[in-house]
Image (tube, rainbow, N blue to C red):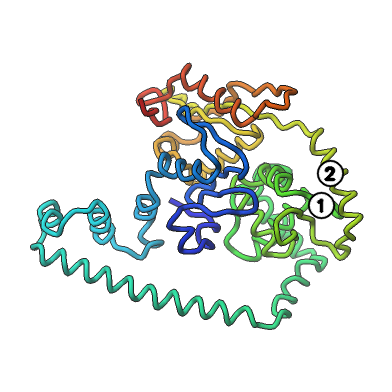
Amino acid sequence: MSVSEAFWNATLEELKRGYRLEGDHYVCLLCGNEVETGIVYPADGLLYEAERYMRRHIDNVHHSVFDYLTQLDKKLTGLTEHQTLLLRLFYQGKSDAEIQQELGIGSASTIRNHRFVLKEKERQSRVFLAVMELLKERDKHAPATLGTAKKESIAATPSPDEQDERTKILRKYFPEGTSGPLYSLPRKEKHKLVVLQEATKRFESGRTYDEKEVNHILQDVYHDYVLLRRNLIDHSLLEREPDGSQYWLKTNEAGKAGEQMDRKKELKLQYKEMKTEAGVYQIKNTKNQKVLVDSTMNLKTINGKKFQLQNGSHINKALQKEWNEYGEEAFVFEVLEVLKVKEDAFWNAADELAKLEEKWLDKLKPYGDKGYNSQPNK
């Protein structure tokens, strides 16, 4: 199970909740799912405001943050398999005697000793966390010129050898060409910079974008567009207002306020003219005919789901398991129905898309032996 950079950058409280607020969206730290603030979401005959809907998402999809965290690889948690098992039993509220009987090891005093070891590990973690926090505070006072050399190297004209290396990197991470989606975000900083620079070509210099427009552009680049957006900002390739209301491509001419507003109006007009289709699609296993039914506000982002499966990071474990077992060639992606847009002030795309998805779930019933969707609660 892989985790996003947003997960690692979250505060302790955000990790415990499983989500964080980014601009006007709540982002699930466990899978990247987003909900927009100010919108009411329907589910099971009830209406939920964004934050409550996100909590419901975590309960329904991930069961609990505790379950998700204890399923992470031991290389990420630092816990042995035995310690993880004990923590799960402790979380269930079982007594030392009950745990000893269930595991069939030692005695109740043995379990108490394990509790002590885990508490000691917690104390050590607190000390280490405090040390790292102090180190971060120290870094804030470091000279601002430390990053100058790196930024200058980004802007410098590459030599023929560097250009050849750049081409190889782009071919590796953009297997369908640089106009297609990004396969994965490199870990090596040098490779990451090349990929991020390429991603900036999707934006126009001198224009400003709101967050929805930025997300719309980056969704076609990478499935974890929130992570990509943050990296563009962290590497000073994309700049934004402190409140996240406006974004723009970093240039030597940042643009004056009046020019930015004109550019923004022009961009909004073009954005409205761009055809983005919402709809319902299925991922079908041609070997056993099982399907996963899902919906999206932008059907162009279906490729992102394919990349998740290729990377072993799709949130549907049953689908991911059979993808690994049968191979990519056994699966097809098919659009079932495109959402028809209505020119109505009271028409809500998210609500209508949810109804459309429900229609196809009722029709195909992709549960159990027939599919990968979770059986709805009766």
Front-lying residue, 285 or 162: 285
Residue 35 place in picture, x, y as percent: 57, 43
Q: Which mark is residue 184?
A: none
Q: Residues within 10 Å of mark 1 (few under 14, many from 20)?
A: many
Q: State the image quarter where residue 179 is shown.
A: top right
Residue 70 place in picture, x, y as percent: 34, 55
Q: State the image quarter where residue 332 is shown.
A: top right
Q: Amino acid at mark 2?
A: Leu
Is residue 75 shown above or below 177?
below
Q: Is residue 325 visible?
A: yes
Q: Is residue 188 left or right of residue 90?
A: right
- Upstream in sequence: badge 1 or badge 2: 1
Distance from the alpha carbon under mark 1 to that under mark 2: 8 Å
Front-lying residue, 179 or 159: 179
Residue at which label 1 appears: 208
Is residue 352 shown above or below 96?
above
Residue at which label 2 appears: 267
For the residue labelled by badge 1, is the local secondary structure a helix, a strand or a loop? strand
Q: Residues within 10 Å of mark 2 (few under 14, many from 20)?
A: some
Q: Is residue 250 left or right of residue 340?
A: right
Q: Are marks 1 and 2 in contact (CB under 8 Å)?
A: yes
For the residue labelled by badge 2, is the local secondary structure a helix, a strand or a loop? helix
Q: Is residue 17 left or right of residue 256?
A: left
Q: Amino acid at mark 1?
A: Thr
Residue at the spot x=46%, y=26% of the render?
291
Q: Is residue 159 visible?
A: no
Residue at the spot x=44%, y=38% of the render?
316
